[in-house]
Image (spheres, coloured by chain):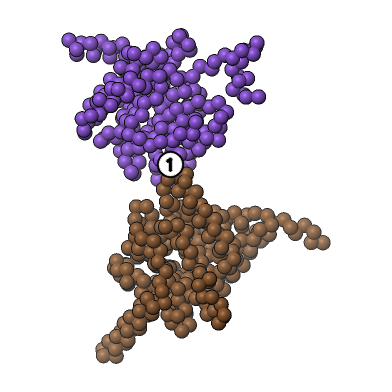
Amino acid sequence: MSMSYDRAITVFSPDGHLFQVEYAQEAVKKGSTAVGVRGKNVVVLGVEKKTVAKLQDDRTVRKICALDDNVFMAFAGLTADARIVVNRARVECQSHRLTVEDPVTVEYITRFISSIKQRYTQSSGRRPFGISSLIVGFDFDGTPHLYQTDPSGTYHAWKANAIGRSAKTVREFLEKNYKEEHMESDTDTIKLAIRALLEVVQSGGKNIELAIMKRDESMKILVQEEIEEYVTAIEKEKEEAEKQKKKT
Amino acid sequence: GNPLKTACSDGDGSERKIQFLHGTTTLAFKFQHGVIVAVDSRATAGAYIASQTVKKVIEINPYLLGTMAGGAADCSFWERLLARQCRVYELRNKERISVAAASKLLANMVYQYKGMGLSMGTMVCGWDKTGPGLYYVDSEGNRVCGDLFAVGSGSMYAYGIVDSGLKQKDLTVEEACDLGCRAIYQATYRDAYSGGQVNLYHVHSEGWNRVSQSDVLLLHQQYQAEKA
């Protein structure tokens, strides 16, 4: 009866939905939270680190990947799917360097990743990728960028955004607390990303993984101590803010 | 067998030579205010002058030029294809293609036909965000960046003029144009396979413009008069 069901899986529903794409977006919502902030001189990506089993090696679970010297990304959703996308993007970054003798722009590689994702929503026998990604970096001319892609293959530029579990809460936090002037300072940009993640992550700094990139420098993944420093500073600021409130 | 051999052979199997524009002088050099491109316009078939009015500069787009040496059809066809590719790049990336990338696209295109009889020796000249750009690309697969190139049977004579003229630093646009013109003229004077007119282009930050087209016989009279 169902002999003809090895043709296209992603087909339109009568009311115009691509259900497979929407289900993929649901899979993304189950993934651990990732947050990205674009500052003036630094770009930041933070992800929620799931607590690993006792015997598991912490360092093999890396959700932030460098695509080239000037671009890196984080994702939310199916880790296995992400690996494929990241690999293709890394190869494309080098192919671009070879044919055009220039590093990719953040927009170019985002567009490339998005068109791969879109292709999978229109191929027979394939399912869409179950990941949304946050792609950050600096172009050749020094402009910072933050892009978000989703399983449907669309992409948009953002000043700050979050994906994955509780993305809505984090995004609302960012909308409330993003201040253009603060983006001039590297520390404030990093602090905003951490504060946003702390809203949804259990038990503080231990479950946060953070990567930053300053203009003309390569990506740096912060060690636990550095993150703890920021967290302590943030908590101090919170206390001071509370004290001020109580005084007035 | 070799398609080139088949195309080249007469009915009795002896080889007839395909006429290529190796008889030519094309020249391009970078200077403070961009790139000067100067070419002759003669096409020869053995000792017969087939044409005195060949356009050996191909206008790829408003800010990129290509010169023609070797097979005229090969040069113009591939450079038109390059123009198409450059335009697609512009539309996709919302910015002009760099000279490095354009020349690389051309080099990669013809490399696929290496050994199949293409004959093309071209200079890709333009201005991009890194400044003036000049690349020599040929059908053997060479692609080199440089400040000065001369290609063709009259190239040695042209090099002599340009090398001595570029000794002084910081040429003005007018001086550079005169130098390019003079170099091609001198080459046509000594090389039998170069002649006709000197077509001169100047590539600057806003794009290229056609500076002049001068008949070499008139140039000869002009330079003779200056000597007196």
Residue B34 place in picture, x, y as percent: 29, 35
Quarter of the view holding residue B168: top left
Instruction: Using the rendered image of the protein, determine whether residue A74 is visible from the camera's viewpoint.
Output: yes
* Res A120 quadrant in image: bottom right
Residue hosting label 1: B101
Q: Horizontal placement of B23 versus B13: left or right?
A: left
| Image position of A139 (left or right of A15) | left
Instruction: Pinpoint residue A167: horizontal percent, then vertical percent.
Output: 49, 73
What's the residue type where badge 1 is placed? Ala
Residue furthest to the right: A1
Quarter in which the N terminus of chain A is drawn: bottom right
Q: Which chain is brown?
A: A
Q: Is residue B44 above or below residue B161?
A: above
Q: Please give left or right for residue B197 compared with residue A80 in the image.
A: left
Q: Residue at x 31, y 11 (%)?
A: B217
Count all numbered tags in the image, as a single digit: 1
Q: Secondary structure at mark 1?
A: helix
Residue at point 28% right, 25% down? B162
- Of all chains in the rendering, the one displayed in purple is B
Q: Position of residue A231 (x, y in %)?
A: 37, 80
Chain where mark 1 sits? B
Residue occupying the point 64% across, 61% down? A127
Q: In this orientation, which residue lies closer to the viewer: A39 or B147?
A: B147
In the image, A9 versus A224, the foreground residue is A224
Viewport quadrant of the C terminus of chain A: bottom left
